[in-house]
Image (tube, helix red, strand yellow):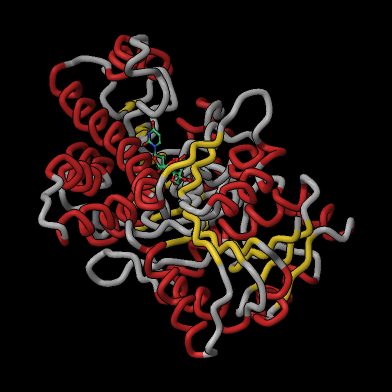
Amino acid sequence: MRITVIGTGYVGLVTGTCLAEVGNDVLCLDLDASKIEILNNGDIPIHEPGLLEMVRRNVAAGRLQFTTSIEESVAFGIVQFIAVGTPPDEDGSADLKYVTAAARNIGRHMTEYKVVVDKSTVPVGTADKVRQAVIEELQKRDESIPFAVVSNPEFLKEGDALNDFMRPDRIVIGAEDARAIELMRNVYAQFNRNHDRIVVMDMRSAELTKYAANAMLATRISFMNELANLADKLGADIEQVRLGIGSDPRIGFDFLYAGCGYGGSCFPKDVNALINTARENEIDLKVLTAVDQANEKQKHVLLDKIVARFGADLKGMNFAVWGLAFKPNTDDMRAATSRVLMEGLWARGATVTAYDPVAMAESKRIYGDEPRLSYAESSMDALDGADALAIVTEWKEFRVPNFDALKAALKTPAIFDGRNLYSPEFMREQGIEYYAIGRR
Ligand code: UDX
């Protein structure tokens, strides 16, 4: 099938490439010429494991192409995925200007039936706005070409996006038009083997499903984080509690890890967008409001523990920080806890030596030549002369450090671990002061 994907950001590029991988002909449009140039030069503008190889393979096979031409992209696919950005505006709601612009471009240039698919995470009701935008453009041209709008939310995790796309646990299709539903079933046929993973529903329910999924996951995390803070006071171990409750199949083990807060481009944005949508409809989402507040507080938990150990005035101290990305296998630092920690340390007079396997370039972009921040070549180098170590991201390479060398390098052998990487007993045996999240 011929498919157009509008937007070569994270979602668009992964979607386009995976659809090409299973044999579709895909044309990706981006109005940012620099992104298309990077792609046409055989590179990718984002970091995602395995994606570069998959892009190159499909470009070489002639199934994946890139363009900046709107006319060409509208003419190309019978299915037109809109996967453009929806940046939060001041009040946290998603800004839809790129989504509606993409819809208008389709309406302006289409000459035959099109399925317009919302892939970006958009507030409930956006599909109707997309439909309206296309209709308005068709009316300007005095045309009445048939088209359908579909809501098809993505559930990709950064760092594991290819696997999520290639082996989805569900494919949500919100559509009311029989022909569009049939076409969407064909688009996803290769990903829908063994048992039917396609859930067809109305558009508004599909739009709400995406927010409901992220809000539920964020709720689990904030819930566990609050219980971890309580466990700290009670002398209980949140990891034991996790095992104790996760064995109930209604609860399950996944996504119950206490830590120093969730970040990234999805949870914080989607939780706030849903709260705003609810408010506009005169519903006060009390649970979700608390989830967000608890998370904002949790991002300070490492600093609080550092202050409890070293005092409020950290002037002249240097802290090693392992991990800048909001989670492993990405260079994304959006809403990352590392930023709250580092900015808090600076405000109290300390300096930071950071190490991250891939996000240091992104950090340099954000913080420029911030004098209180320096970068180390390796995790162990970051410890040299540091007063103590704080761990923000659970990169694999942090899991088994040389603890003797670590102890020797730090002025105080103290680890503030925001991701509960080590066993508290083992740390005690090593003679390391260990401050984790909700561990005895
Ligand atoms: C998330 C959803 O998982 C995905 O389905 C959706 O499409 C987009 O949002 P992502 O933001 O890429 O994906 O990352 P994810 O792996 O879900 O982690 C989000 C944050 O939660 C990270 O900061 C992570 O450290 C934190 N987290 C996750 C916890 O603190 N505890 C957990 O148990 C799991």
Q: Is residue 157 above or below residue 68?
A: above
Residue 331: x %, y % from top left: 54, 54
At a point 19% along the width and 21% down the height, the residue shown is 231
Q: Is residue 416 visible?
A: no
Quarter of the image for the N terminus: give it: bottom right
At a point 55% along the width and 29% down the height, the residue shown is 401
Residue 389 figure quarter:
top left
Between 203 and 377, the one lying in front of the other is 203
Q: Is residue 55 left or right of residue 45?
A: right
Q: Is residue 440 above or below residue 184?
A: above
Residue 180: x %, y % from top left: 58, 54
Q: How many marks?
A: 0
Q: Residue furthest right?
A: 61
Q: Is residue 197 visible?
A: yes
Quarter of the image for the C terminus: give it: top left
At a point 71% along the width and 75% down the height, the residue shown is 75
Q: Is residue 294 above or below residue 180?
A: above
Residue 54: x %, y % from top left: 77, 50
Between 316 and 103, the one lying in front of the other is 103
Between 220 and 121, the one lying in front of the other is 121
Q: Is residue 31 left or right of residue 315?
A: right
Q: Is residue 72 left or right of residue 145?
A: right
Residue 67: x %, y % from top left: 72, 75
Q: Quadrant of ligand 1?
A: top left
Between 136 and 410, the one lying in front of the other is 136
Q: Is residue 407 left or right of residue 53?
A: left
At a point 35% along the width and 71% down the height, the residue shown is 95
